[in-house]
Image: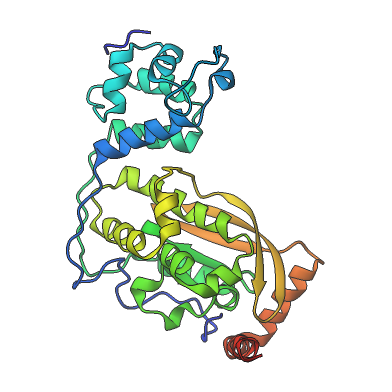
Amino acid sequence: MDDQGSPETSDTAHTPATPAPTGTPHTPAAEPLDRRSELSEFLRTRRARLKPEDVGLPDFGRHRRVPGLRREELAQLAGVSVAYYTRLEQGNGRNVSAEVLDAIARALRLSSAEHAHLTHLAKPKQHKKRKRSGRPAQVRVALSQLLDTLDGVPAYISGPRSDILAWNRMAAALFGDWGELPPRERNWARLVFLSPAYRDLFLEWDSKASDVVSYLRLYAGCHPDDPDLSALVGELSVKSEEFRRLWATHDVKEKCHGVKQMRHPLVDDLTLSYETLQLPDDEEQFLVLYHAEPGSPSAEALRLLASWGTDAVRAAQAADTARNDA
């Protein structure tokens, strides 16, 4: 190949009436993420996770100074010169062709999300620079009404940077009283890394934390100049060693579907499946729904949460208090 080239107190869905930005007017402007550095580190970490035997290359047993493939090995697999690949891994992605990026993605065994991330970093689209406007992301009225109708199904809408924009009564019953939080704290990254209650809620907390960071990384590849994202990453990097460690892995993932194991303070253990649906008129908003297998103990637990309704918050808080005082 040529290389030159705790539940809500309202029975209706809640859409915050006040701004819900990640930063605040009192937060100094954060430095944007360095796209060249992001490209360099992403390629380096993807190369480091591969061994010669993983890609059909001989390993002669010589001492390897770096983990994973050498640059010359990766260049050979991709069909580009070592000098060309080295420039790219140093963050110089100018004029790189889609064909070359595809070849490098294949050589690195990238997932579809990782391939998209590489393309965003190397060949960025021109996005209008984001500013703090003081206005919240808008959720269509029809979507809020839809959330209301999902009786017994925890559902919410997330937005850029994993902000929580709207939710129904069952989501609040399952995840906690988001309506009691300041708007800027209605954010999955802040909740998972800074709130002890969410460490207790998710039995596989490490998996949830990794997912949240991977989603942020994918968003960062598209919007490195987003000041609210930079502020969020800066804050969490200071406050959470675990966030710093996961952010440094440069892993990316698309929001999709799966299963979560939870331990609710009111109904104990739950096994819930979730589905993530991208909204057709806003690629940065997602409808997330949780459900239990019909007839399972988890389905009965959700039914109990629904029956408690607006009293579920107080009951869960009382259960937490009793457990802590025991």
Residue at 59% over, 62% down: 289
- Number of callouts: 0
Whether residue 215 is visible, yes or no, is no
User: Is residue 76 left or right of 211 when viewed as pictured?
Assistant: left
Residue at 22% over, 54% down: 130
Instruction: Indicate the quadrant where residue 21 lies.
Output: bottom left
Residue at 39% over, 66% down: 139
User: Is residue 264 left or right of 64 when viewed as pictured?
Assistant: right
Instruction: Indicate the quadrant where residue 266 lies.
Output: bottom right
Residue reaching furthest front? 63
Q: Nearer the viewer, residue 88 or 270?
A: 88
Whether residue 155 is visible, yes or no, is yes
Q: Nearer the viewer, residue 154 or 247?
A: 247
Q: Nearer the viewer, residue 96 or 319?
A: 319
Q: Is residue 112 above or below residue 302?
A: above
| Quadrant of the rendering where the C terminus is positioned | bottom right
Residue reaching furthest top? 2
Q: State the image coordinates of residue 301 (x, y, percent, origin top left).
A: 73, 75
Q: State the image coordinates of residue 184 (x, y, percent, origin top left).
A: 34, 72
Residue at 64% over, 79% down: 265
User: Is residue 63 left or right of 119 when viewed as pictured?
Assistant: right
Instruction: Indicate the quadrant where residue 202 lies.
Output: bottom right
Q: State the image coordinates of residue 248 (x, y, percent, origin top left).
A: 39, 46
Colour scheme used in the picture? rainbow
Q: Nearer the viewer, residue 140 or 212?
A: 212
Q: Is residue 297 above or below residue 9?
A: above
User: Is residue 4 left or right of 117 when viewed as pictured?
Assistant: left
Q: Is residue 56 above or below residue 222?
A: above
| Quadrant of the rendering where the N terminus is positioned | top left
Residue reaching furthest right? 295
Q: State the image coordinates of residue 8 (x, y, percent, origin top left).
A: 52, 82
Q: Is residue 147 above or below residue 307?
A: above
